[in-house]
Amino acid sequence: MKSNCHLILVLLVSFFTSYSQSYQVIYEEYINIDPSSIEKASQNQEKEAIEAMFTQKKQLTYKDGLSSYANIPEKGINGSSELSQLAESAYYKDHKKKEAIEYLPNYLPMLYAEDISVVNPITIHNWKITKQQKNIAGYNCLLAQYTQPDGFKISAWFTDELAINEGPRNFWGLPGLILQLQMNENILLVARSIKNDVEDDITIAIPKNKNVMNQKEFDSLQKELSKPKTVVQPDGTVLRFLDPSTVK
């Protein structure tokens, strides 16, 4: 009985300690990166030789069981409008409510042009932890992998030297912080700087808007918006949108 009480006390201490911690992590995202540049980007080497269509800095902020992964404001963003919209989206997790929120500001400006919050239960990923190791940002990391239902292969390097069950975008669920994430062969997210115990500087405000929907509702909206249509802009410009499945 005494040992059981001790175990419960340890678990409670671990639970409240993890929620009381605070972190700020800066990541670099490489979109459509040349696969041959992935290892160079991972080790922050020969940046001038890294080929990617689009790069962007993002910040993961964590405090008291709430996290955000959002764009760091910069003077300019390079890339197409589609990639710019990707850069402006933000991800939130509320571990106490077990909710994950993807915030999409001004979604599809030419077709919808409203802010959307897609709210779903936090995804439980079926990670398989391997024995592969490497050093990222000064921390020893292990490799974990899994495949999403859509076929995307995810590889995550995490460190148990930072005792926080968190990661970029909607990824998490490993016994430590995810410092590098690779999606298929062309998307790479790498941590560049890590600060902890910075509670005085942290505020996480989840955006509030009228368009709150779950994944099924958001998928239905996307399906509706993808139908062929003609849109007349305020300046009189006529835009015709085709069904993407018919475009070869």
Image: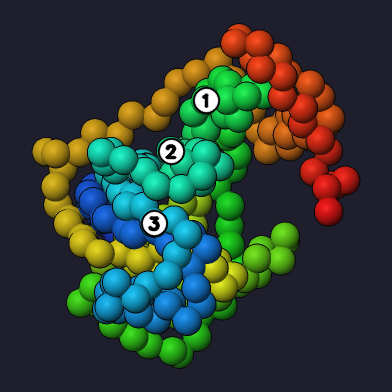
Q: Say whether disc 1 or disc 3 marks the residue closer to the N-terminus.
A: 3
**How much space separates mark 2 and mark 3, taking CA atoms?**
13 Å
Q: Amino acid at mark 2?
A: Glu
Say the numbered circle drawn on residue 88: 2
The answer to whether 63 appears left or right of 153 in the picture is left
Which numbered mark, 1 or 3, is in the foreground of this view? 3
Label 1 close to label 2 by CB (< 8 Å): yes
The residue pinned by badge 3 equals 55
- How dense is the environment of label 2, judged by Cα within 10 Å: few (below 14), some, or many (20 and up)? some
The structure residue drawn at horizontal position 45% and vertical position 90%, both measured from the top left corner, is 131
Q: Say whether disc 2 or disc 3 marks the residue closer to the N-terminus.
A: 3
Which numbered mark, 2 or 3, is in the foreground of this view? 3
The residue pinned by badge 1 equals 106
Q: Position of residue 103 (x, y in %)?
A: 50, 34
Q: Position of residue 93 (x, y in %)?
A: 44, 43
Position of residue 31 relative to residue 202, above or below, is below
**How much space separates mark 1 and mark 3, taking CA atoms?**
21 Å
Label 3, secondary structure: give it: strand
The structure residue drawn at horizontal position 25% and vertical position 38%, both measured from the top left corner, is 75
Q: Is residue 173 visible?
A: no
